[in-house]
Image: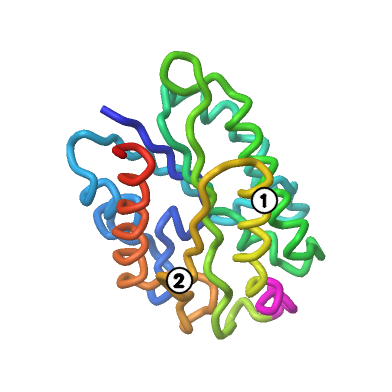
Amino acid sequence: MKTILCYGDSNTWGWNPATLDRYAAGERWPGVLGEALGAKYRVIEEGLPGRTTVWDDPIEGYKSGKAYLIPCLESHKPIDLVLIVLGTNDLKMRFSLSAFDIANGAGVLVDIVQRSETGPGGEAPKVLLIAPPPLGKLTDFADMFTGGAAKSRKFPEQYRRVADELGCAFMDASLVITSSDIDGVHLELRAHRKLGEAVAKRVREMLEY
């Protein structure tokens, strides 16, 4: 059995923009991924609302993806593949970051995984770096993400740059899904389904061929 770790934020956790609740396990994209891959795979859902790449949040606290990644890898090892889907929360105005720096933050996480010995046989797990989709039409979160929409549209090129520099696999989620116009940040049910199925295809390419 191969183990896949999905390391993300509220869109991996399953935030429903219409109800402000959580989608059911089978509706969230990691659940769709697990269903599509079948019994030979174990999919671990590690989504945290508000999680950043490497930054400490001065308002929400305890959100740095860097701070939790090493213990997360250790607790779930051996891991065959880590999916990193972070960066949306880094767009918040309070961080004042460019798309370049956000992608570099995601790269720090890739490097941590690649330097770890948490894969089979004490090797490093493989990594798939996924660029989150651009922000949509912002409503309730408009002030929080001031200026973020334009930056988010640069994610594909910047994340691809980082993936190329670090030698990991890359996927552009914007080619598959869009953020909901309900709040401009989160994913609707259909997007979770499409993302989970698209990631499953990519996972098979990485682990089965």
Closer-to-camera residue (203/76): 203
179 is higher (above) or lower (below) than 139: above
- The range drawn in magenta is 143-151
Q: Which residue is mark 1?
A: 162
Residue 188 placement (x, y as % from top left):
37, 73
Q: Which residue is mark 2?
A: 175
Which residue is painted at 44% across and 44% down in the image?
Answer: 6
Residue 24 placement (x, y as % from top left):
28, 57
Find the residue positioned furthest to the front: 209
Callout 1 crowding tier (Cα within 10 Å): few <14, some 14–19, many ≥20: many
Which residue is painted at 65% across and 81% down in the image?
Answer: 142
Quadrant for the C terminus in the image: top left
* Residue 162 visible: yes
Mark 1–mark 2 Cα distance, whole angstroms, equals: 18 Å
**Residue type at mark 2?**
Leu
**Residue type at mark 1?**
Val
Taking the image as shown, residue 72 lies to the left or right of residue 108, namely left
- Quick one: SS at disc 1? helix
Taking the image as shown, residue 184 lies to the left or right of residue 147, namely left
- Quick one: SS at disc 2? helix
Residue 124 painted magenta:
no
Residue 23 placement (x, y as % from top left):
33, 61
Quadrant for the N terminus in the image: top left
Residue 96, which numbered label? none
Which image quadrant for residue 158?
bottom right
Which image quadrant for residue 197?
bottom left
